[in-house]
Amino acid sequence: MTQTIVDIRDLYVQYRTFDGQAKVLNGVNLTVKKGEKVSIVGETACGKTTTVKSILRILAPQASIPRGEILFNGSDVLKMGYSELNKLRSSGASMIFQDPTMSLNPVFTIGEQMEAVIRYSGQSGVEQKSVRHELAVKALEETAMPDPERILQSYPFQLSGGMRQRVCIALSLATPRDLVIADEPTTNLDVTIQDQVLKILKQRVEAKGCSLILITHSFGVARETTDRIYVMYAGNMVETAPTQELFREPLHPYSRALMSCIPRLSGGGMAEGIPGRLSNYHNPPKGCRFAPRCPEAMPRCHEEKPESIDVGREHQVACFLYDKDGGK
Amino acid sequence: MILTWLKRLGTYLFVLLGLSVLIFIISRVAPGDPARIALGPRAPESVVQALREKMNLDKPYVVQYFLWLNDAIRLDLGDSLQSRRPVIEDIKEYLPATLEIVIIAGIWMIAWGLLLGILAAKFTGTWLDGVIRVFSYLGVVAPAFVWSIILMLVFAYVIPVFPSSGRISLGMAPPPRVTGMYTIDYLLAGNFAGFKDAFVHLILPAIGLTFGGIAQSARITRGTMVENSRKDYILAERAYGIPERKMLFKYLLKPSLIPTVSVTSLDIASIFGGAFLVEQLYNYPGLARYGMQAVLNKDLNAIAGVAMVLGCVFMIVNIIIDIIVARLDPRVRMLGGEN
Ligand SMILES: Nc1ncnc2c1ncn2[C@@H]1O[C@H](COP(=O)(O)OP(=O)(O)OP(=O)(O)O)[C@@H](O)[C@H]1O
Ligand SMILES: [Mg+2]
């Protein structure tokens, strides 16, 4: 059996706000196996970033986690002490952020930042500056960066957006990792280089044999890059299936609605084709959070929260339509 | 980069020139005839007229200005009415005394401002943050002389641990003059008792001047650090397992220092401003007290001299601060700043 790298079980996350607690994650389940590449797709504010930030425990201070488990290589991230957590961060998982103009420290050179990350990676030999330097150069070369030595001496503002994002990719894989998390790594880039950056990311992750969680707004990107897709809606993973299968046969009404509005995706927001709005997190619907917008909602959907059920190999859906005594 | 600095130097010179015009206007255009003032009310008109011509007061203002500027550049600032000697001599005597206070106040202000700011940022939302915030409001609300009076009452009268007047104790001989700053001159002369005595005299007036500045830099440091700590690059660095302490004092502090350092020049200006009353209060023979008396006595040459010197000191403070900001911020260093 392939080893599971991340296993998120029934995770609830809420944010303290002026209007009370915003109950954002509503029992998220997510697993990633060794070497597997999964994507999370969902409209804005559905909780994608919140989900992945909780893996590294870098949620905002207003966030709290009333329930749930996040197992990373078998140990619960939420119960980790400081040193265990630091080990996870320095050598377990790494994260690439959405906006490359914001994710590098403006007043340190790329070299200083890469070497700092390498230094605390727990690898042997990194106490030596020459070793750190070599690793940094190698990581940059691997992302097809021209003239790594010059890049290392540059400050972020001297690089283009695409170069910065490649630096971030290099950084995330400069030392061995089990998992790379990329939160919309190309959204803020020029369309012309989005493809190139994604290819590099995919190629690097595969070469290092590590797992990938890719957050994206685009089914096209998800399809090209990942083996399996999670469809997220208002704090729940409503469906997950291998990429091909999801495209062939989306089951959840939300997935189906999303798929049917793919052609309009390039234009505006993802959910433009679906009537209604994302539900309010302060006062969410009692049952299925999609029920108010769902064309096939049944009375039961407004009362109970549907659990994820297996409907095929690696295919799960959280919807009463597919409940043994509910539907199909 | 050299071009940037040349440009900046040009700006400084321009500001100094502007200041000189202002001072000239104060000293010449202000009501009262300088020749008459210099000679006194009983001098005969013919003598006054002769002096007027000697002082070029009969020439057009523009000509007067350049003649005056020419003298000022050669440090000939005229005589002081109060001391009856060249203003530049007075400045040589009093400026080091004030610089001594301002330097100590500056160091004290920066150290506490940063420390309190970092602590408040680190412990955002806790009681410590609250205490520091209250202190900051007090520091900003009460002017320097109020703090100085409180310090004097508490530490010179109630618990008399510090002297409350002068530069050195009665009966102490001043050190042989090298820099004019007693602490340094005593040290140079190897007189440690003297150093200690002079230093102890500086503490209360210096600290009294810093409350506003400490409050200001603490608030700015805290604000910037809290704001930056939400930035992705800090999250990213934390997510890479860089130890918290390293994060706080290096990766978060360095980008956050820039606004604090930039306002330090204003804080130092307010230290000088506060010194006018505080030197008076501590009967401390510094340039600020000298300037204050010059104002009270309408001693125009002395006022012009003090203003000019303060202007130059500010210029130097600003240059130093610009250099530090450029060291901290590569964008300023390499692009010459956005403004
Ligand atoms: N620090 C916070 N305080 C309060 N609410 C927050 C905070 N961070 C996120 N939220 C809320 O949580 C919800 C989910 O946010 P999240 O950033 O996880 O969405 P997302 O799916 O990543 O969206 P996007 O696609 O726009 O990046 C949003 O409604 C957001 O307003
Ligand atoms: Mg997001």
Image (spheres, coloured by chain):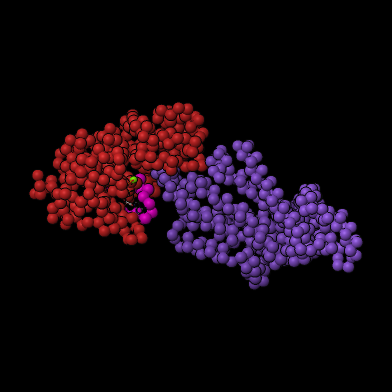
User: At x 46% / y 53%, what residue is drawn?
Assistant: B226
Nearer the observer, B238 or B269: B269
* Residue ranking furthest to the bottom: B158
Q: Quadrant of the C terminus of chain B?
A: top right
Residue A264 spot, x, y in % from top left: 26, 40
Magenta stretch containing residue A297, yes or no? no
- Asked whether residue A34 is in view, the answer is no
In the image, taking residue B289 as reference, residue A82 lies left or right, namely: left
Nearer to us in this view, A173 or B70: B70
Residues shaded magenta: A54-70
Query: Which one is nearer the viewer's eye here, B33 or B119?
Result: B33
Tell me where residue B271 sits by quadrant: bottom right
Q: Percent from the top left, x then y, of residue A178?
A: 33, 37
Count of numbered tags: 0
Task: Write down which chain is painted purple.
Answer: B
Residue A265, above or below B283: above
Residue visible at 68% across and 65% down in the picture: B277
Asked if residue B87 shows in the view, the reply is yes
Dividing the image into 4 quarters, which one contains the N terminus of chain B?
top right
Q: Give whichever of B206, B315 is nearer the camera.
A: B315
User: Magenta stretch: residue A63 in it?
Assistant: yes
Taking B64 as reference, is A217 left or right?
left
Where is residue A125 drawn, in percent x and y?
45, 33
Which chain does red denote in the image?
A: A
Residue plotted at (41% across, 40% down): A100
Q: Where residue B237 appears, x then y in whole percent? A: 43, 43
Residue found at x 43% / y 41%: A101
**Quadrant in the picture for residue A174:** top left
